[in-house]
Image: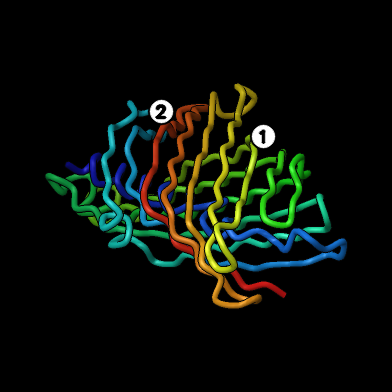
Amino acid sequence: MMIKKLKTSISVAAAILCGGFGAAQADEMSYATSDWSFAAAPYLWAAGLEGSTGVFGLPAQDIDLSFGDIWDNLDMAFMAVGEARNGRMTFGLDFTYVRISTDINTPFGILANSIDAEVTAMMGTFYGGYSVFYQDNATVDIIGGGRVWSVDNDFGLRGGLLDGRKASDGDTWVDPLIGAKFRTDINDRVYLTGWAMVGGFGLSSDNMWDVMGAVGYKFNDLFSVVVGYRGFGVDYSEDGFVYDVTQKGPVIGGVFKF
């Protein structure tokens, strides 16, 4: 039970972290201008997490977390996307930071009465793209870039023979990625949007994929809301740290243009 709760704590941070490159990107820039345009977008991905995780070289543990499990362990989170477009060219950055913590009681209380677990995780995605299909009401962009991950797991022992002892484990890695994004207008207010990406290629993660489809609604020229569904998977392991998970669930984001 103690190991299961500890793995759950680590997995919660990873689950929120994966919200990177999220739903907020679904509303693209104005396509019919040769001038630079910009957007900033907070978002939420209400996803569950399945797979396996491991630290300190211990055997990886299976996990199956709902969005409620993730929410209950959250201390702090910040998720936002920025994007710039000039004609066919587009550049974007997605930054996500999350901190979660939990108090785990040990079964016997000899070595320690409890374990304080705190996980901080940062993800930054950067990409550039070019529209291979470019019309006033529809575009298809080919994109390429990278996704930087940094995860730090800190554990502190309280009570028992190991009172006051601390331990940390984590890793930082970069996944190259390529993919495509699209948008097509249904009418003046409603549009469809989405993407498909793959990455890792054995250079960092063994593999990584990310797909999303959404419907957007424009309230005016400066603000839109998108609602859809997203799935994501990654398989990474290095020096006893294992992160092999799939995350999927509904997404919602607001896009502010300026």
Q: Position of residue 130 (x, y in %)?
A: 78, 44
Q: What number is the disc on residue 57?
A: 2
Q: Earlier in the sequence, mark 2 or mark 1?
A: 2
Q: Residue at x 53, y 53 (%)?
A: 192
Q: Position of residue 170 (x, y in %)?
A: 50, 41
Choose top left, top right, bottom left or bottom right for residue 51: top left
Q: Secondary structure at mark 1?
A: strand
Q: Foreground residue, 27 or 166?
A: 27
| Position of residue 255 in the picture relative to residue 85 (left or right) | left
> How far separated are the C-alphas under marks 2 and 1?
31 Å
Task: Give the residue pinned by disc 1.
Answer: 178
| Position of residue 205 in the picture relative to residue 76 (left or right) | right
Q: Secondary structure at mark 2?
A: loop
| Position of residue 26 in the picture relative to residue 141 (left or right) | left
Q: Is residue 195 above or below residue 226?
A: above
Q: Amino acid at mark 2?
A: Gly
